[in-house]
Amino acid sequence: MNSDKDIAIKFAKENRFDTAVRSGKKWNGELLYVAKFKNGPDGNPPCTGYPQFVIIENSIPRFATHNEILNIMGITPMPIGFTQRLEDYI
């Protein structure tokens, strides 16, 4: 039986990442992993936007959805249909 770490790394590699590492966070009782690329020539990982969290439920890996990523990061997403702009407040 593969460990969650092994499952996360295999899943990340199948989706063109180089590896996956534990994020140190739990979400809904599940350990989270972050899919990662190798560092570039400058020694830094490439900027890819939000972290790509790998969630493993019952030994089945999947990427977190956009709203799950925001929730994991503690960011409140805008409600569907939100149309106000910053200019409306200036």
Image (cartoon, rainbow, N blue to C red):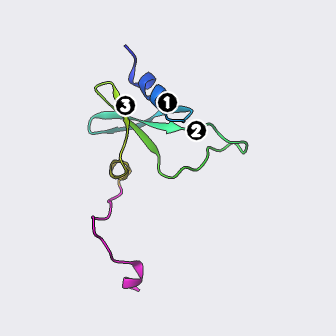
Distance from label 1 to label 3 (Cα)? Answer: 11 Å
Q: Between 81 and 47, which is closer to the camera in this rendering? A: 81
Secondary structure type for disc 3: strand
Total count of labels: 3
Q: Is residue 79 magenta?
A: yes
Q: Between 44 and 24, which is closer to the camera in this rendering? A: 44
Region in magenta: 75-90
* Secondary structure character of the magenta stretch overall: loop
Mark 1 vs mark 3: give the one in front. Answer: 1
Q: Residue at x 32, y 59 (%)?
A: 76
Say what amino acid the circle numbered 2 marks. Phe
Farthest top residue? Answer: 1
Say what amino acid the circle numbered 3 marks. Pro
Mark 2 vs mark 1: give the one in front. Answer: 1
Which labelled disc corresponds to residue 14? 1
Q: Is residue 54 magenta?
A: no
Say what amino acid the circle numbered 1 marks. Glu
Distance from label 2 to label 3 (Cα)? Answer: 18 Å
For label 3, the residue is 61
Q: Residue at x 65, y 39 (%)?
A: 39
Q: Is residue 2 above or below residue 8?
A: above
Secondary structure type for disc 2: loop
Q: Quadrant of residue 4?
A: top left
